[in-house]
Amino acid sequence: MTRRYSALSLFREGLANQTGWEPAWRSPQPRKTYDVIVIGGGGHGLSTVYYLARNHGITNVAVLEKGWIGGGNTGRNTTVVRSNYYYPESVALYGLAHRLYENLSGEINYNVMLSQRGMVTLCHSVAEMEIAARLVNAMQINGTDAELFSVEDVRRVLPNYNFAPDARFPVLGGVWQGRAGTARHDAVAWGYARAASRLGVDIIQNCEITDFIIEGGRCRGVETTRGAIRANRIGMAVAGHSSVLAAKAGFRLPINSYALQACVSEPVKPVLDTVVLSPGTGVYVSQSDKGEIVLGGALDRVPSYGQRGNLPTLESVIAGLLEMFPSFGQLKLMRQWAGIVDVVPDSSPIIGESPLPGLFLNCGWGTGGFKAIPAGGTLLAHLLATGRHHDISRPFDLDRFTTGRLLDEAAGSGIAH
Amino acid sequence: MQLFPCPFCGPRPETEFHYNGEAGNIRPDGAQVSAECWAGYLYERSNPKGAAREIWVHATCQEFFVMERDTVTHQLAATQTPGFAEHAE
Ligand SMILES: Cc1cc2nc3c(=O)[nH]c(=O)nc-3n(C[C@H](O)[C@H](O)[C@H](O)COP(=O)(O)OP(=O)(O)OC[C@H]3O[C@@H](n4cnc5c(N)ncnc54)[C@H](O)[C@@H]3O)c2cc1C
Ligand SMILES: [Zn+2]
């Protein structure tokens, strides 16, 4: 059996007619009890179980996914990875994720195709340039690799942009993060699942949590479509469905669920080798390794659990793209889709014990949690293993909505994604 | 494009409307409101999957109304003029 992925094993398997590969992860029947269970097999749930085993040696663990792993937002996202946030608390969180991503492929022996191609956030007015200068200063003080770009710098990285004198969204400059880029979404889910499975964690798919087992005021397990499963500690990372499960556990969350959509064009030759975000048009865009132009924008304006997205937002995203890159008007769209994202008033995640003791939360990533997967998993694993906050997760506890210590990144860094 | 029914103007495109919050989220009153109670009012939401009662405003005529709809199918059930106690904000 070939377990390790390498150029040599690929070569050997080629000679052996590809007969020695084993499934990337085991799919056992769920046991009746575990030390820890994690609900939700997206990137955050899967990285949590991996770090439980890797960092804390806790391997009597299952991750329970109602569909297939990575079939939620993780497999639907546009894969931008960056850490150019404003508040020091956020920089600690997203910086940790960014550093872990940089070593992830080697660590889990799975190529997540991290491509640090750089990202530019455009400024379309003098006022935006002022704010950009302030943001870049704050980021540099916090140790993030941010640079203030002039219009010449933007021209250098985005030769296709609409720099015409009558352009509706003229560019004055931008904020550059050179270490930002993209990664392959499925590979992040599958790679963590494979690495966790090899450390002894059970990956259970097609297993929907329908209720919680609550005894003596504590969460003791879950009812599922595959029977009751008990555990001492339970983690929950179900993104847009957090409120639905919270209602079953007897509490409410500061979350609204919305559809966030994206689309891709037909694949074309390389034309765009960075990630671009324009707060003016509300559009962000990159080109995938396959050549597709991948684009997305703002949330749909109607609160929704309908995993499809509506027409007005799609229209404004495409209109915005064509203002930025008129030549893209020749492209045909291949696919459009949406994921249900968990939007929090201060655009920062919620990590910590829930109002139901024994149940721990990792949610509220909204439109931007792919970039945070390695950190979200590290921090939820720390909570589940020790029962206490990691220093980095403490500010993101649910209690900030009572104390008023919000971390308003929508206002701070002005970027939704 | 979905049409939403404004009680004042009739069916209009969804882009003319703005979501204003869950119906029945009533502002706490009095001198002794706890921080938990404020957090409940300001931030915590039921965020239902399925049947929902919501306050919407038709931005063009400024009519506020309650819309009952399904958050999965987006099917509309009913619209009403809100009672005083149901006004969000
Ligand atoms: C269109 C789009 C573009 C995005 N672009 C970016 C981007 O460029 N960069 C970025 O950083 N982020 C982006 N995001 C956000 C990012 O995708 C999410 O924040 C992140 O993937 C959340 O991961 P997760 O593991 O928490 O959730 P998910 O991947 O959604 O996983 C949650 C899982 O829980 C499961 N689940 C739900 N209910 C139950 C239940 N009752 N029982 C069992 N399992 C259940 C679901 O099936 C799902 O698989 C984007 C999102 C979308 C939709
Ligand atoms: Zn009207």
Image (cartoon, coloured by chain):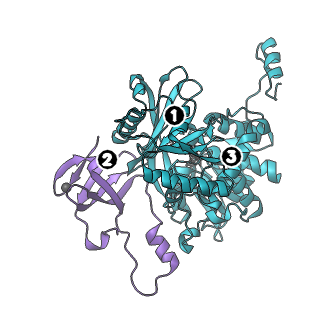
Estimate the x, y position of residue A337 in percent, counting from the top left.
Answer: 46, 36
Estimate the x, y position of residue A127 in percent, counting from the top left.
Answer: 44, 54
Q: Are marks 3 and 1 on the same chain?
A: yes
The three-letter amino acid code for the residue at tag 3 is His
Q: Quadrant of the N terminus of chain B?
A: top left
Q: Is residue A24 above or below residue A67?
A: above
Instruction: Look at 51% across and 61% down and name the residue there.
Output: A346
The three-letter amino acid code for the residue at tag 2 is Gln
Q: Is residue A36 above or below residue A157?
A: below
Residue that carries the numbered disc 3 in the rendered image: A98
Are the residues flagged by discs 2 and 1 in contact, CB closer than 8 Å?
no
Chain ID, purple in image: B
- Given the current orientation, which residue lies at the most extreme bottom position? B31
Tell me which chain the residue with mark 3 is part of.
Answer: A
Q: Residue B39: in sight, yes or no? A: yes
Residue that carries the numbered disc 2 in the rendered image: B75
Q: Residues within 10 Å of mark 3 (few under 14, many from 20)?
A: many
